[in-house]
Image: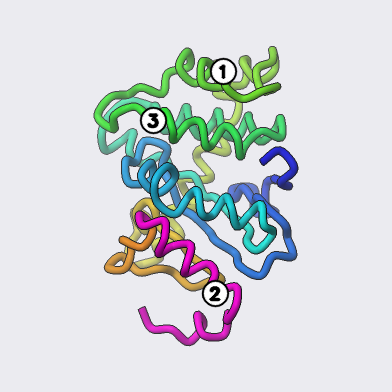
Amino acid sequence: MEDLPEKLGADGTTIVVGDPDAQVEVHLYEDPRCPYCEQFETSGGGPQLRKALLDRTATAQYTLASFLDDRVGGDGSKKAVNALRAALKEGKFVEYHEVLFLNQPEESVDGYTDAYLLKLAGQVEGLRSTAFDAAVKSMKYRAFVADAQAAYERAGGTAEPEGPGTPTAVINDKRIPLESNGILLDGTAFAGLLDQIHARPWEWEATVL
């Protein structure tokens, strides 16, 4: 995954991964503490999306929310989003993002502590450094964390002022509706959807979900 381009989007809140010329654009809204996001990333559509990124058929955009801290208590989501932003600075977002979800604590446990985040960072070759460790411990990117949460809330529009829920996927500017969200947790179905959109994007645009 190290050869995948990754950068901060022009809006300052979206993390963009993959070939910018890919025909399929998947925009994901995730909270690091969300158990359904963990299902997507580990056993659902996430591995299929990573394959599509490597095949250069898709790009991924991530808006990282942190609302579960207020809902469940603690500050683990904020700390994890800050650490992910610090990993992006080091060009290691993709690998660290995968490691965090593979080792996600229980939602009810405020488990993304500084120590745990740094321990997990040790699983990503070349990520740990004085600068990265200091960014994690000091919440260097707290402004990014707040701005990303605000972007998540805006994505819900007037109908969902607290945000669209996580995980939410918008593919080629078309959102998978809540009642169809099960496809995100089914790796085979999600891979099929990505293949279908890549082969016949005009059909996706016309699909009524």
Helix, strand or loop at mark 1: helix
Helix, strand or loop at mark 3: loop
Percent across and percent down for residue 182 are 31, 61
Q: Main secondary structure of the magenta part?
A: helix
Residue lying farthest to the front in this orientation? 188
Q: Is residue 153 above or below residue 176?
A: above
Percent across and percent down for residue 178 are 31, 65
Nearer to us of marks 2 and 3 is 2
User: In the drawing, does residue 42 fall left or right of residue 120?
Assistant: left
Q: Earlier in the sequence, mark 1 or mark 2?
A: 1
Query: Which label was assigned to residue 104?
Result: 3
Q: Residues within 10 Å of mark 3 (few under 14, many from 20)?
A: some
Specify start and end residues of the magenta stretch as a single range: 185-209
Q: Residue at x 74, y 65 (%)?
A: 21
Q: Residues within 10 Å of mark 2 (few under 14, many from 20)?
A: many
Three-letter amino acid code at the position of disc 1: Ser
Estimate the spatial distance between the alpha carbons at disc 1 and disc 3, rounded to whole Å. 21 Å
The residue carrying mark 1 is 138
Q: Residue at x 57, y 50 (%)?
A: 50
Percent across and percent down for residue 24 are 61, 67
The residue carrying mark 2 is 197
The one nearer the camera, 94 or 145, is 94
* Quadrant, the C terminus: bottom left
Percent across and percent down for residue 151 are 50, 53
User: In the drawing, does residue 33 fall left or right of residue 94?
Assistant: left
